[in-house]
Amino acid sequence: MKKLFFFPLLALYLMACDHADLYVSPTEIYSYSEGGTFQIYVFNAQELKVEPDKDWITTSVKVDEEHAGNAEVTVQIAPASSKEVTTGNIVITDTKQQQAVTVAVTREGRNENSYITISPIELAVSSDGGQYKIQVNCEGKWTVDKDVNWVSVNPGVGSGNGTFTLTVEPSDKYETTMAELRVSSFGGSKDVTAILHVTRAALEVKTFFVSAVKQVIFSTGNLQYKASTNEWRFAEEQYDIIGEGNRYIGEYNSGWIDLFGWGAGNNGVKPYQSSTDNNLYAPIGQDIAGTPYDWGYERVLRDETLGIESDQWRTLTYEEWKFIIDNRKYSTFAKIKGVYGLLMLPDGVEPPETVKVEMTQGSTMGLYAVTKYSDAEWKLLKSVGAVFLPCGGYRDGTTVIMKRIPDGLEIYSGSYWSSTSHYKLDADESYKEEAAGIGFLFSETDEAMMISPVYSDFSQGQSVRLVKDF
């Protein structure tokens, strides 16, 4: 679109003339096919009349109040409706002086890719996601590009007027999420693009009762640490485990670890510590709940999935772990992305209609089948707030045990610290002070033993999953 200007010196000269002829600038307007807005400047008009001769040309006049006889004509050219070049005229007349000037208007014809429109251009979606039809109007070929992976389009290319289906996945974040889709057409007289903005509502916060009156939110990944940068984070996915990588534990390790000794989060107990001396960890016989030994104590951590950043993360006590497990309506032993683990649904939440979640029997020991979930099923479970505790093995010094083979049967184990120190009755009937957590076992036949307390040496490396009071 061309923007035209007049020369101020010429304008001043014309205004100085008492009986100058009608002067109009410009006398030609050239428009691309999409039309646009143009300006015509008029000088020395005593009685002005402006008449376009085509209905795709509209005009409005603004008279200069300070300089009689001068005016500005705004010309609006509508987009072309055909492929042909169209012409028209705007006759500007001074009826008192009986003078007229004709402004010639030329508009390009609509060519391939010269325009593209979509409907709607703004879309508000609930946290449940959904499918939507998007209308495309275009003469040429078009493609759809997106900037996030939680939307998909089908088809992603087309030609001429048509539609595509936009699928928005259910949200797994506790913050509003945005997406931008660009529908573009290339290769014609010019490249054109239309933009669709999608706003997906935040997921409703899902909680777990840890007592009759207290609720928590689980982080959406196990705790991880990198010694070389002294950096803490939550795993990107709930099924992420470091596994054998934990054997590289040490002060200068540039990889991530996720199996920690008792209280190895702060207050002098280094997260990268691998000694098997129990006395080098959090004080024996004392709980670490609410102390600097707790892995989450006053540590600012951002859960990218939840969209929550806080310094109020903490470790559950053993009693809270047991309350969650014993009061769960829906929980099951599961295998997701090839990783064994325990899956639990929040309080008051029903499984998606198309996904089966077995009900376990609290902390009762027994042998149970393992449910294997597809990627699509796991996405649906995440959308209702499912928590998955992956089986990450355990560490003894720098040795990582992902599986054991008693009597020739492969057994995979998962164990999670609590913030509670317990007494355990030894074989000689003496009491030994040990830290307690929860654990579960999986066999090679895709069966699992029920959740049970784990009493382990303080030096043993175990998984940590933090929560935040709600």
Image (cartoon, helix red, strand yellow):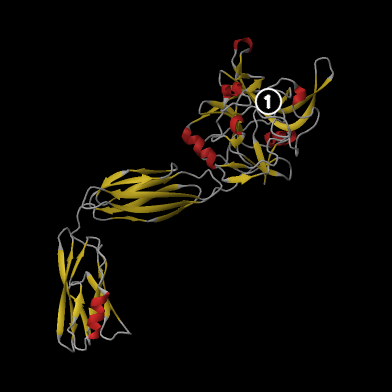
Q: Nearer the viewer, residue 303 or 436?
A: 303
Residue 387 drawn at (x, y percent): 59, 36
Left or right of 53 on screen, residue 65? right
From this viewpoint, which residue is outermost toward the right? 430
Give SS at disc 1: loop
Question: Can you tell which quarter of the image residue 369 is in?
Answer: top right
Q: Is residue 449 visible in this depiction of the protein?
A: no
Q: Quadrant of residue 25?
A: bottom left
Q: Residue at x 23, y 77 (%)?
A: 10
Observer-nearest of 202 and 314: 314
| Image height of 100 relative to 32, above or below | below
- Residue at far top of view: 407
Give coordinates of residue 199: x percent, y percent.
46, 52
Q: Residue at x 35, y 51 (%)?
A: 134
Q: Amino acid at mark 1?
A: Gln
Q: Please state the horizontal and vertical placement of residue 286, each as a whole percent of the image.
A: 80, 31
Q: Is residue 118 visible?
A: yes
Where the N terminus falls, by quadrant?
bottom left
Q: Is residue 400 left or right of residue 42?
A: right
Q: Position of residue 226 (x, y in %)?
A: 59, 31
Q: Nearer the viewer, residue 150 or 442?
A: 150
Q: Residue at x 57, y 26 (%)?
A: 242
Query: Residue at label 1?
Result: 273
Decide: few, some or many residues near mark 1? Use Cα within 10 Å; few <14, some 14-19, many ≥20: many
